[in-house]
Image (tube, coloured by chain):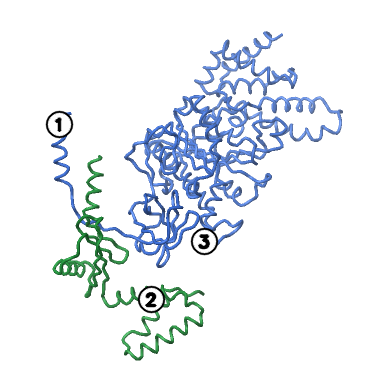
Chain colours: A blue, B green
Amino acid sequence: MSKDYIIEQLKKQIENFETKMQTEKVGTVLEVGDGVAKISGLSDVMASEMLEFPNGVYGVALNLEEGQIGAMILGEFSGIKEGDQVKSTGKILSIPVGENMIGRVINPLGQAIDGKGEIASDKFYPIEKIAPGVITRQSVNQPVQTGIKAIDAMIPVGRGQRELIIGDRQTGKTAIAIDVIINQKGQDMICIYVAIGQKESKIARIVAELEKKGAMEYTIIVLAGASDPATFSFIAPYSGCALGEYFMDKGKDVLIIYDDLSKHAWSYRQISLILKRPPGREAYPGDVFYLHSRLLERSAKLNKDFGGGSITALPIIETQAGDVSAYIPTNVISITDGQIYLESDLFYKGIRPALNVGLSVSRVGSAAQTKAMKKVAGKLRLDLAQFRELEAFAQFGSDLDENTRRQIERGKRTVEILKQDQYAPMLMENQVAILYALTNGFLDDVEVSKIKAWEADFQRYLDSSAKEVLTLIADKKELTEEIVAKLEKVIKDYKILLN
Amino acid sequence: MRITATQYAKSLYEVTKEKSQSEIGVMAENFVKVLAKNRQTKLAVKIIKKFGEIYNKENGIAEVEAISSRKLEADQIQQIEKFIQGKYKVSEVIIDNKIDEKIKGGIILKIGDEILNGSVERQLRELKKCLKK
């Protein structure tokens, strides 16, 4: 670039520079407390409009009352004092969006917090948006491969679905979510992990693990830490969703994990109580249901005319002592299209993922399951249900008839096969192969204690010597007679090899 | 129900509207008595402020704070008065001229919760932003 050109440009800019009077609406801070400010003036501010406090801190107008407004402060509020001037901006709260967010850790305002430099973006999406309407939607018809046998087989999740992960603390809720993200490699899915009020150490560990598995290449982490103001926790899921909508509008499939929505409800409760909104059940404000329903309703599968993108949501709820009938869990259960229910009893028994198959359901996902998986999984649920029923009653005596004994043995093996290590998601075709072997009795002569080792070896054998069958299942996505014959031959060959 | 300062100020304005000096004196005294009875004398400062706002609004008076780097000349003040009268449809303008050298030049007008910022300082800031791009 020549010097003259620069000067020419400068001249043009200076000439075109407008020296106009600028009208600003201002108010004065009346009181500040715990991330919330009461402001007088600002008579024609909009609901949820961004406000500018001195030294560049932003806020959002929440309560509009006669003569004053209540606003939450996004960021450091200790510097704000009574009498400070607050400017209105005329903009609804929005965050920058863009492709270059992928692979980054950001705060709910879209600023990078991973130390890898600023994220330049000129496109903004409003944080709060009305969910896509009926005419833009399509029924769920494509699966999200979670890579977890128990989920893919019995509680399938479809693209555009909202599947709740619910359970007590330390039952592996986040572990499931992270495994799902890891398994999205090469599945053309963008993952957004929204951490709400989480420990920063936990997020550091998750980021490290995702980087190790190469999963950060398609993942964005939105972090509102435990030490950040409650307002950050409150807007974090909406920010994450706005980011997701940007990709959905481009026709992409997005997976969002909200970890977790109980902390989100707590932060909203805090803000509401400080704003003096009347408390209701469990001291939550009256609109706590709408808080989550308007968020989760934004997950959708759009039809072809609208780009065909989707947002799949996996909200997480932490229960206290297994109480699913508390206020927030019942709310979110009723909003979502099914739940994955984790139990601490199962977890301590060594059944991990600690999935309670009886209480977990997926209300729409089975429509999206591949035919192959449907075929092998149909029997699985039945086997397990019968096993549960017989298990309790079999403890009283050993005098069981042949049929009952066989069912119990099969059940024990099923439970064993459904156990899966963390960070070890499995491909659909491998899942189908092992579940086929299980449900068709090929494992009945293997000792229960040796099932895990048998399976590990079998998977290795499949990957090395039976690639052909695996690719067939992956391509056709169903079990034709020809494939079944081939699969059975592989299983028999492997068993001969063992003996 | 709690009575707010705005409500007090409004009622005070209404009872004293178009009354003679002596009547206003009685009303004001009564008003203070009512306030004391309701134990809300601490609202007095706020009520006085609100009353001023209401009085100005009802009588078409605008109080303007004009911040400039040098003291405004008489004809400048007249110009501002005309400008405000035209913009806000008021009959009387009270200008309070304050001097702040930090704004370097131009003028900042504060009317109620609106600020008209025409200072050189702001324009320089905008120019800086513009050049940065």
Disc 3 crowd, CA 10 A, few/some/many (<14, 14-19, 20+): some
Residue B5 placement, left or right of B96: right
Residue A360, position in %: x, y? 63, 38
Are callouts 1 and 2 both on one chain?
Answer: no
The foreground one among B77 and A392 is B77
Q: Which mark is residue B48?
A: 2
Where A415 falls versus B93 (above or below)?
above
Please state which amino acid type lies under the numbered disc 1: Lys
- Compute the Cα span from label 3 to label 1: 61 Å
User: In the rendered structure, the residue with mark 1 lies on which chain?
Assistant: A
- Compute the Cα span from label 2 to label 3: 29 Å
Residue A68, position in %: x, y? 41, 64
User: In the rendered structure, the residue with mark 2 lies on which chain?
Assistant: B
Disc 2 crowd, CA 10 A, few/some/many (<14, 14-19, 20+): some
Disc 1 crowd, CA 10 A, few/some/many (<14, 14-19, 20+): few
Residue A301 placement, left or right of A52: right
